[in-house]
Amino acid sequence: MKRILLILVLFTTTIALSQEKTFESEVKRISNRIDRITKQQKDSLRMKVREINLQLENNDLTKTEANELKKKAAAYHAKQIEKLVGEQQKRLQVLVQAKTDGKILGEDRYYEESTFSVGGTTFQLRFTEEDFDKKMERLDRRNRRRWRRRTTSQFVFAMGANNVLENNQLTSLNDSPYKFWKSRFYEVGFTFKYRLKEEASKTYLKYGVSFLWNNLRPDGNQYHVVNGQETNLEVYPLGTSESRLRHVQMIFPMHLEFDLSKNRKHDDGKVYDRRHQSWRLGFGGFVGFKLGTRQYLEYRNASGTKIEELQKGSFNTNIYNYGLSSYVSYKSLGLYVKYDLNPLFKNTQTRNLSMGVRFDLD
């Protein structure tokens, strides 16, 4: 009888201790959720205010507009805290009532927030508080590594007008045999942006690789004719609706870039790069080589049939090319100019000139 009584006492004590441990751990978990909700909302508000202040410094907002945005942001996050904390307080009330009634929280209760159903089947994702904290720490470390990176990559796309200069004379554009706005260039590539200093800076070396399509459309029903070592423009015997010489190149650009974006200072006191948020200036050049040259002709023959003709050949264009290039950009959009220092055709002083817009997507 004494042995049975001892077993009952031990069993009752174990249940009581288990109940107390479950209750205390759940109270702690709810308390941690409330702290986390408050911290997240305050951090979000702090980031929004920081962005608004930055726009105010850049004159993108007036002081009145900035104050109004700050008030709206503060009101929104205050409501979020009230709503989300209120939900946790209701959970705490239910927990206290369960404790008062002598009930022990079961597994289904413990993980109810992580339960979902698919096709009538119920699944549970069981994450502990420690798992969440570790995940947030990993995310924070990853973000800080990204901000500290000295080298970043960008996708580059540029397009605009393409033409030629004779004897390096800009005035020769007035007598150019090519249509100015219909002769276009396109550039697609990738660049790497390397910060020259270990600490946050505004000076970078930008280098990469691009594919370039230079198109020249002759004026006055002309087309390109190869005469031995020379390539000349001659009038086509039939009226052309299209006459275009396409010169495709692979180039390796390199620029010294000054990014005037205001750097970011975090709560840990460290200053991190803030790229592509303001004006950027790039000065440099490129080297490359020819991938191919083609001439496209469209015309109607004597019977009125439309003919599309593709001519492949070197057209006496130089294999290698090099030149100067520069751009001035605000954020990701800028103006771009590129000039070949070597002649386009052999035995000539004809050099390619390109001007247009440039997109650097960081």
Image (cartoon, grey):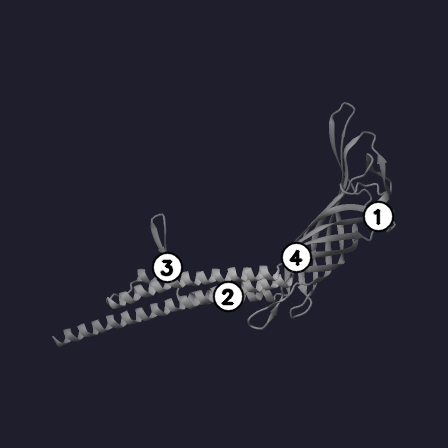
Picture coordinates of residue 222 (x, y %)?
82, 36
State the quadrant of the N terminus. Answer: bottom left
Residue tagged 1: 165
Residue 77 appears left or right of 279:
left
Picture coordinates of residue 232 (x, y %)?
86, 40
Q: Which is more N-terminal, label 4 or label 1? A: 1
Residue 361 appears left or right of 104:
right
Residue tagged 3: 113
Q: Which is more N-terminal, label 2 or label 3? A: 2
Helix, strand, or loop for circle 4? loop
Q: Amino acid at mark 1?
A: Leu
Residue tagged 4: 331
Helix, strand, or loop for circle 1? strand
Vertically, is 71 above or below 210? below
Residue tagged 2: 43
Q: Amino acid at mark 2?
A: Asp
